[in-house]
Image (cartoon, helix red, strand yellow):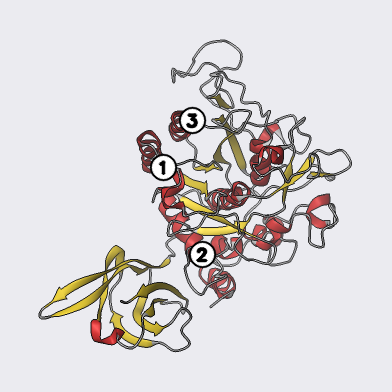
Amino acid sequence: MKGRFSLLLVLQCMLMCGSPAGAEDMLSPPEVRYFSSKGSWKQEFADQWALQRIGFDSSPQSAWRLVKRDAQPVIVAVIDTGLDWDHRNFSWDSLWRNPAETQGNGIDDDKDGFVDDVIGWNFIQNNNRPWDHDGHGTLVAGIIAAAWSDKDGMAGVNPFARLMILKGIDDFGRARASKIAEAITFAADHGARVINLSIGGNKITEAERAAVEHAFSKGAVIVAAAGNEGVDVSNYGIAASDKVLVVGATDVNDQHAPFSNWGKNISVAAPGVDVMSLRARRTDTMVSIPGGKYIAGSHFVGSDKRYYRASGTSFAAPLVTGLASLMIAKDPSLTNVQVMQIIKSTARDVGLPGVDQYTGYGIVDASAALAAPKDYFLLAGISRLAPVQKGNATVVRVFGTADANAFKSARIEIGQGDNPQTWKPVGTIAKPVSSDGPLGDIAASALAGAKVWNVRLIVQHGNGAQREVRYKLNVG
């Protein structure tokens, strides 16, 4: 099924949605230098390969061509180290403006507790100047919304994004959970439709959890980086929340990046190695990365050194944020749940077959996501296996998700070993099953003859698409 979703959904959209009024009404790929160049740091791949890999390319099938030129502006909150808003490749038109606040009058006009919060807020220094002295936030912001007007520059994903700049990380890359929670709450209360959190953390705090729940209830899509420690993300800060799209990183070969955290909470993946973006003045973000292997200045790009390449899930997440916000620009009636479901359901399967702990549903596919009907989803997941007494026998009960907006069928199969070549059907599922519901039972006798098994769930959509997921089971 790899690679099938995009073409299938684009064709369906052409049939169901009708043809656009004309090509001239749709976005065209940006005509900027770095979008079409390669080798700027002596690499063999395109400078903005990450955009192209998820469907934002210059071909007639480019994802941008599915969006009208007069799409709606979308408020996107970037909770990070701030922004160098004077960068020549960033437009002031891409900044959110608080409509209830008068700039420079020293009065809290909208009585929200923040004086002159015109473009956002600096939660570190408690003022209205969220300037970036680290560089991380400017990199993230550029991936989402670098202006298309600079012919010598690069392109951001979404020209309709209006960035709300919320500085919740200090100039040394450190963040306090209380400040992050405040920033999330601010974003939700001021109308952010998408919130980008390219931050790390340990266990999620109650304040952060409450803020995420609040933002989700207000309709925000929350996108979080998985983190770069190569560990299980299940207890890793905000990425541990089930109300968040958690993004892992892949490399130029579509493989899971070794540094990218993993686990059952990974929703999708996006390119996160050598991602190019804007460099804030007098910054060198990678210097602060632990390990001491980085050579200062070696990731600057361009003769003016105003561009930068960086690796990390921090730079995979804003690709997904850009896509989510572009989906909303195209159709403002989309809910946060619909956006999250579409992005997962249309992702391109890579790596291990099916939904896995390294790339989730796969690498995001912008063309498929933008072409999908608003109610489209196709979800498969095994959350746990548990022994259950059924009459006089013990069975292994499978719990998880088998759901779709046009559910056709689902089935459970088992296979011996780490990578089964043959599969034995053990049960069918006639009706959709929501999150962590009982999917079926496996008789203990069916698991005789081997110590290692894989349980496979396959869910079929009425349009012919299917998703699978595997769960390793050790017996004895």
Is 187 situated above or below 449? above
The residue labelled by disc 1 is 203
The foreground one among 341 and 385 is 385
Q: CA distance from mark 3 to mark 2?
A: 38 Å
Where is the C terminus found, in terms of image quarters?
bottom left
Mark with earlier residue (1, 2): 1
Seen at 36% across and 80% down, the residue is 451
Q: Amino acid at mark 3?
A: Arg
- Residue 224, given in percent of the width and then of the height, sits at 51, 47
- Residue 194, given in percent of the width and then of the height, sits at 51, 43
The foreground one among 279 and 204 is 204
Seen at 60% across and 38% down, the residue is 162
The residue labelled by disc 2 is 372
The residue labelled by disc 3 is 176
Seen at 49% across and 42% down, the residue is 193
- Picture quadrant of residue 371: bottom right
